[in-house]
Image (cartoon, rainbow, N blue to C red):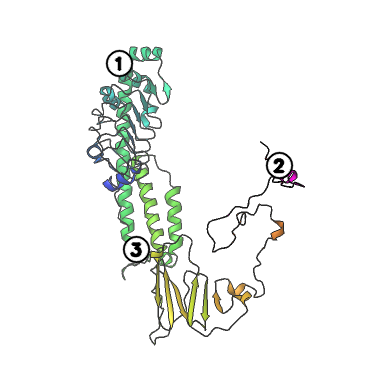
Amino acid sequence: MFMHSVHLVTEDLIRRRAEHNDCEIFSLEEVSLHQQDIERIEHIDRWCRDLKILYLQNNLIPRIENVSRLKNLEYLNLALNNIEVIENLEGCESLQKLDLTVNFVGCLSSVESLRHNVHLTELFLVGNPCTEFQGYRQYVVAALPQLKWLDGTEISRSERIRASQGLEEVRILVGEQEEEYLRRRVQEKEEAERKAAGSEKKNQERKPGFDRCWYTDITNTTPGLEENQENPERDEEEEEREFWGTPCPFTPESRLEAHRHLEQKRKEKEMKTEKKPKAARTLITADGRVLNVNEPKLDFCLTEDDEASVIILDLAVFRHLDTSLIDVDVQPTYVRVAVKGKAQGEIKVVKIIQRPPRNCGNRRCSSPQDNKRNKNDLPERLEVDPSKRTSFDIANIVQRRSTKEGPLEVNRTTPPEADHLSEGFIDDPDVPPLI
C-alpha cells in the first residue's frame, strides 16, 4: 500500500515558476501554480508581498487561507479546487477579480465576506452547488453592490435595483437551502469515512507484498484467494473497472479519492518500468586483453605511415563538440577515446594492408554502416569545368614583373586616340612644338 504524499508550496517551486522574473520571488508580481496538486496555500503572502496576479487553479485546495497580506493582489484564480466557503480575503484590499469556478461552495451567505473588497468588480461561481439555489443571482447582486460582472454576465442598473428591493425575502430563502445543503454534506462526509475505512480494511486483509504478490497466513482459508494469487493482473483490472464504474456523488472527498487513486497507479507504473542501472562496460579483460568497443557508434579511420613511422587516428565526433568533452588515452598497444563520457573504443594497432588512394589508401576505416555498404559503391565528387565558369576571375588582375622586384607595377596603356594620332608621325627637330 502506498503512502499519500502531500504536495506543498515550497520556495523551490515558486522560484521555478518565476523564471520570467530572473527567479526572484520577493519582487514577483505574477506567478502560476496551477496543476501542482497543492493541498494548502501557505508561505505565498510572506515571500511574495508584491503579487498582483496569482493562479492556483486545478489543485486540491480545501480552504482560502494565508493570502490576507497580499495588499496588491488584483486577480486570484482558484478554479477547480475543493473550496466550500469564501473566507479570509478581507486583507486583499486591491482585489478586483475572483474566480471560484467549479468548486464546492455551498454556503452562499459567505459571499457577504467580500463586502470589504470595495474594488471587486468580477466574481465567478459557475459550477458550485450554491448556483443551484433559488434566488442565487439576486442574492449575490444585492449582497455585493460593488460587483459589475457575475459569472461572466454584466449586472445592469435595473437588475441591481430589483435585487435590493427583495433582499430580505431572498436571504431567508437562501438560508433554508443552506441548512438543507449542510445536512446533506454531513451525511456525505460520514459515507466517505465509512468507505475509506472499508477500503483500508480490505487492503490489510489482502496483505500485498513488495513484489506485487499476495501472501496470506497458513490458517487463512478465504475462498477464492488462491485464484486471485494465480491471476493478480486480472484482479487488478476488475478493481479498476469497479472503481470507475461505481457511481458516487461529486464531492471534495470523491475528487480527492480519484486523485489519490490515479497517483497510486502512476507510482505503481513507475516502479514496474523503473530502469535498472547499466552494468559497467568491460574494456580490458582480467587477462589484459583489450576489447574493441564503439559505444557512441562514431566513424573513424586509422592510417599507418611506414615512412614517417606514425599512426594517425581520424575520429568523426559530433559537430560543435567542445574539446573539453573529449578524453584521449594513447597506449603502446591501443588508443582509448572517451567522448562525453562514452568510450569510443579500444582501437588496436595492427598491420594495415596498402590500398589504392581511392579506397582510403593505407587507412583502416570503420563505421556502423560498413557491414551493410558495398565496397564498390564509393561516393563520387562533382567537379566543375573551368571553362564553364560564369564569374570573373580576379586572381591575376594585378601583375608583377618578378616576385623579387620591388612594389607592384601597373601596366599603363596608351589611349586609343593617342595611338591613332601617332601613326606616321616624324619628329623634326627644326619644327617648333605646337602650343
User: 118 left or right of 316?
Assistant: left
Q: Earlier in the sequence, mark 1 or mark 3?
A: 1
Rendered position, 156 above or below 248: above
- Residue plotted at (37% across, 26% down): 133
> Residue 362 appears at what percent x and percent y?
57, 79
Q: Hey, what amino acid is under mark 3? A: Pro
Q: Earlier in the sequence, mark 3 or mark 2?
A: 3
Cα–Cα gap, marks 3 and 2: 131 Å
Q: Hey, what amino acid is under mark 1? A: Glu
- Which region is colored magenta? 407-427
Q: Hey, what amino acid is under mark 2? A: Val
**CB atoms of marks 3 and 2 within 8 Å:** no
**CB atoms of marks 2 and 1 within 8 Å:** no
> Residue 319 appears at what percent x and percent y?
48, 61
Q: Nearer the viewer, mark 2 or mark 1?
A: 2
Cα–Cα gap, marks 2 and 1: 134 Å
Residue holding disc 2: 431
- Residue plotted at (58% across, 54% down): 409
Secondary structure of the residue carrying tag 2 is loop
Residue holding disc 3: 208
Q: Earlier in the sequence, mark 2 or mark 1?
A: 1
Q: Quadrant of the N terminus?
A: bottom left
Residue holding disc 1: 168
> Does the magenta segment cover residue 257?
no
